[in-house]
């Protein structure tokens, strides 16, 4: 029996909620290059790449492609869930992995940007505005389904996963890179202690916000503010992995941390100049601390890449 949706999960099915979600994703599409987060650090990105695939110069999707998509499998039809501005799908088509793709996103502005970019590059990409929570997918249509940091915004995970399972071809893959940590960013006590104790060891100049003030301690997200801004944010993130395992054959899961790094660098990443060896050394130190805490079982990994297939997948 699958777990029922928690009553305190909020919800994003009302028209006003969907409008707020759409605005958030439109803003992300418009300003995606201007929104620094922990993965914008080249030092962190290299370490994450090593944790996922063993090669600091190979992204998570590069690793997946090399392991599971030999050229003999290229050329089918793909699907992207929560496609936003469409960069990911354009890269997949330009590599030749898929010959055509469908992409769905709740934001009209995001879809407009994606359509314009795809048309300019002459790519066979079909983009539509849709709420993935209620989307009906055609059975057996897709050789590859992808999602990049989108699934933690889907509330009806059972519907989404069941639909993807049936929409995959017998030999198809569903791969996603996702935040799978505490729902609604309600960080654990142990997590907050580790983040704030490590932050306290930084020089003052690295702990300042853009206005010059000292960054406050990292705290759990304000639920009321979070629901006002984006009612879909991390709505059931902690249920993603167990539900994926219930609906799919998870052939590989690569955890890559973020439990500390995600919020440690929130609003202060711009203070680190990675042309300076001493700043790189500090970033490496925080990365190493997180890895030890996860490897010792003191903290879980909040981010993961999962490679999934149908339960009845062809060999």
Image (spheres, rainbow, N blue to C red):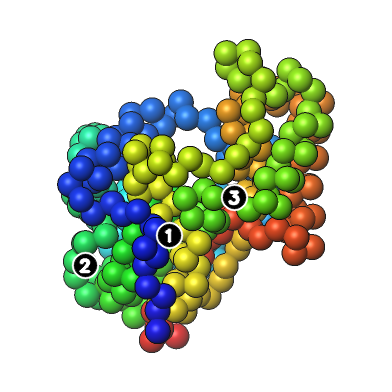
Q: Which residue is denoted by mark 2 in the rendering?
A: 137
Q: Report the residue marked by disc 3.
A: 187
Question: Which mark is in front, 3 or 2?
Answer: 3
The tally of labels here is 3
Residue at the image position 58 percent from the left and 28 percent from the top: 267
Q: Is residue 223 above or below residue 7?
A: above
User: Which badge, 2 or 1, is on the more N-terminal residue?
Assistant: 2
Mark 1 Cα shell of 10 Å, populated few (<14), some (14-19), many (≥20): many
Provide residue 35's location: percent of width, then percent of height.
47, 30
Q: CA distance from mark 2 to mark 1?
A: 22 Å
In the rendered image, which quarter is residue 162 located in?
A: bottom left
Left or right: where 265 falls relative to 25: right
- C-beta proximity under 8 Å, tags 2 and 1: no
Taking the spot 37% from the left edge, 73% from the top edge, the residue there is: 4
Residue 36: x percent and y percent? 53, 30
Q: Does residue 31 show up?
A: yes
């Amino acid at each position: 029996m699958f777990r029922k949706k928690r009553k305190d999960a909020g919800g994003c099915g009302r028209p006003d909620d969907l409008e707020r979600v759409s605005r958030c994703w439109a803003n992300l599409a418009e300003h995606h290059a201007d929104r620094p987060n922990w993965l914008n650090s080249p030092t962190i990105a290299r370490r994450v790449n090593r944790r996922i695939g063993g090669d600091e110069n190979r992204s998570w999707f590069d690793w997946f492609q090399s392991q599971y998509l030999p050229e003999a499998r290229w050329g089918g039809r793909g699907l992207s869930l929560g496609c936003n501005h469409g960069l990911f799908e354009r890269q997949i088509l330009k590599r030749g992995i898929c010959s055509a793709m469908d992409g769905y996103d709740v934001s009209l502005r995001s879809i407009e940007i994606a359509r314009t970019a795809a048309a300019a590059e002459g790519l066979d990409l079909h983009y539509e505005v849709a709420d993935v929570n209620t989307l009906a997918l055609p059975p057996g249509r897709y050789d590859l389904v992808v999602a990049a940091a989108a699934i933690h915004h889907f509330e009806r995970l059972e519907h989404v996963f069941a639909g993807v399972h049936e929409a995959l071809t017998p030999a198809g893959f569903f791969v996603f890179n996702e935040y799978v940590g505490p729902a609604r960013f309600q960080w654990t006590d142990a997590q907050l202690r580790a983040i704030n104790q490590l932050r306290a060891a930084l020089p003052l100049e690295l702990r300042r916000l853009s206005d010059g003030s000292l960054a406050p301690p990292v705290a759990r997200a304000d639920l009321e503010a979070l629901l006002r801004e984006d009612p879909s944010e991390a709505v059931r993130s902690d249920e993603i992995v167990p539900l994926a395992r219930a609906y799919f054959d998870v052939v590989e899961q690569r955890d890559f941390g973020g439990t500390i790094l995600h919020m440690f660098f929130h609003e202060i990443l711009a203070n680190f100049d990675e042309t300076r060896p001493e700043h790189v050394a500090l970033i490496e130190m925080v990365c190493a601390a997180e890895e030890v805490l996860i490897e010792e079982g003191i903290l879980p990994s909040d981010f993961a890449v999962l490679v999934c297939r149908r339960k009845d997948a062809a060999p």
